[in-house]
């Protein structure tokens, strides 16, 4: 490429060359400046005539400001930009932390829900901020805003995700945490669903009349075992050990695989249940894992006249647990293991049922003692009467 001729202007240290516009592809002047700074000669472009609206006078002012140190040279600007970019790359913002969190939690069951919560409620507010930049007021405003339209449990899930992202970064030594504790809204959603004897009998009658054996037996299994909906959907024939009398629950909600015993009712049900080429006991379409059954179980619930807020499958899990707890023959630790609760906290919701049984037992003990005392008094009166004869 030929060297273009430098043309001096009336301003010292300012010259131009005739170049071609990047936009119009027509000829335009490109202005340059020359000056000495810290004993070093610097020569750099000031700007284009049309694209940057550059004139000799403007180029001269830029030259003066750079000599005085009021403006950085082009090289200094590029260096500063590179340094800033390195700083930005080194910053672990909430958005960057969440991306890394997703990579390392790729098999996390609730990742799809976390993605939705992040995109809908957290990204716009916190994506570009580092955890240490957050202030209590940011979270207070978010919590108050969300509680206007969302249930406390939903808001708790959103804030808990933000806390998990930050804790992830802190635990991996990627960033500093917040200077405050993220407060969660109070949630009172401990709901124990139960059925009266009449309701349960009606439901069992409707299940007996149900033509779809897959749905009928799936509901029976929920009642006989207390298994969760997802666990029933994932149940494979290979998970059933008739010889030892156990069902292996793979990848349950609590995390580690669990084993629960199967009773005679479950054995009869499973051995009579139709098998297909599918590995699943209750397969979905084309033999794949079932993903939904709401329409069928809600139809059975409505036909049995059960309460509208009764959840057909999860509710039967509660019925199973409630019957065991109220029997007085199963302690809460055993119930926790049967329900595969990771923590005893969730099992405590059934404690009041056992308390009632204990009260009844205590009352019975009192009645038996009082009866013994009455008999003793009567016996004493008879003895005195015999002595008087």
Image (tube, rainbow, N blue to C red):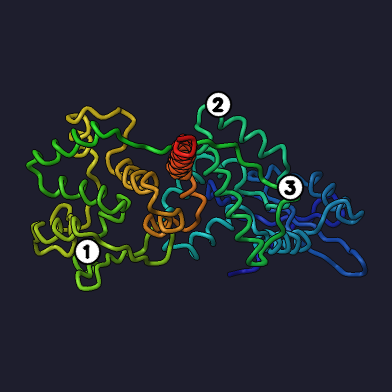
Query: Where does residue 131 sit, x and y in percent of width and height?
Result: 68, 52
Q: Earlier in the sequence, mark 3 or mark 1?
A: 3
**Residue at 61% from the left image edge and 52% from the top image edge:** 94
Mark 3, residue position? 180
Residue 236's tag is 1
**Where does the C terminus fall, quadrant-wise?**
top left
Tell me the quarter of the picture where residue 18 sits: bottom right
**Residue at 64% from the left image edge and 43% from the top image edge:** 50
Marks 3, 1: nearer the viewer:
1
**Where does the N terminus fall, quadrant-wise?**
bottom right
Residue 330 lies left or right of residue 173; in this view the side is: left
How many labels were placed on the picture?
3
Q: Residues within 10 Å of mark 2 (few under 14, many from 20)?
A: few
Q: Earlier in the sequence, mark 1 or mark 2?
A: 2
Query: Where does residue 120 sit, x and y in percent of width and height?
Result: 49, 40
Mark 2, residue position? 148
Q: Is residue 44 above or below residue 217?
A: below
Q: Please tell me whether mark 2 sits on a helix, a strand or a loop.
A: loop
Query: In 3D space, how far apart are the residues under numbered discs 3 and 1 (Cα atoms)?
Result: 47 Å
Residue 122 lies left or right of residue 77; in this view the side is: left
Query: In 3D space, how far apart are the residues under numbered discs 2 and 3 (Cα atoms)?
Result: 24 Å
């Amino acid at each position: 490429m030929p060297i273009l001729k430098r043309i001096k202007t009336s301003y010292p240290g300012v010259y131009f060359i005739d170049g071609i516009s990047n936009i119009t592809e027509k000829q335009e002047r490109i202005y340059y400046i020359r000056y000495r700074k810290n004993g070093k000669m610097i020569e750099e472009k000031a700007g284009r005539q049309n694209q940057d609206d550059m004139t000799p006078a403007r180029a001269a002012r830029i030259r003066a400001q750079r000599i005085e140190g009021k403006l950085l040279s082009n090289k200094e600007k590029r260096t500063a930009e590179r340094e800033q970019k390195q700083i930005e790359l080194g910053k672990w913002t909430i958005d960057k932390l969440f991306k890394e969190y997703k990579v390392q939690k790729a098999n996390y069951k609730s990742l799809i829900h976390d993605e939705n919560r992040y995109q809908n409620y957290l990204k716009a507010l916190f994506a570009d901020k580092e955890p240490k930049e957050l202030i209590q007021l940011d979270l207070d405003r978010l919590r108050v805003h969300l509680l206007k339209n969302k249930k406390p449990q939903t808001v708790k899930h959103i804030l808990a995700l933000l806390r998990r992202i930050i804790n992830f970064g802190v635990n991996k030594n990627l960033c500093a945490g917040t200077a405050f504790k993220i407060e969660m809204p109070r949630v009172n959603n401990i709901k124990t669903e139960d059925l009266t004897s009449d309701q349960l009998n009606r439901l069992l009658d409707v299940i007996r009349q149900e033509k779809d054996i897959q749905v009928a037996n799936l509901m029976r299994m929920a009642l006989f075992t207390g298994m969760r909906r997802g666990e029933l959907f994932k149940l494979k024939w290979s998970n059933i050990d008739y010889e030892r009398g156990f069902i292996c629950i793979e990848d349950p909600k609590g995390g580690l695989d669990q084993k629960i015993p199967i009773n005679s009712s479950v054995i009869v049900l499973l051995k009579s249940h139709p098998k297909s080429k599918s590995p699943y006991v209750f397969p979905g379409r084309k033999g794949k894992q079932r993903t939904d059954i709401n329409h069928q179980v809600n139809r059975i619930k409505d036909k049995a006249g059960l309460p509208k807020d009764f959840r057909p499958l999860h509710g039967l899990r509660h019925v199973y647990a409630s019957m065991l707890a109220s029997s007085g023959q199963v302690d809460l630790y055993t119930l926790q293991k049967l329900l595969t609760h990771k923590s005893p906290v969730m099992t405590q919701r059934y404690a009041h049922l056992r308390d009632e049984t204990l009260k009844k037992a205590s009352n019975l003990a009192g009645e038996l003692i009082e009866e013994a005392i009455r008999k003793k008094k009567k016996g004493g009166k008879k003895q005195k009467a015999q002595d008087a004869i």
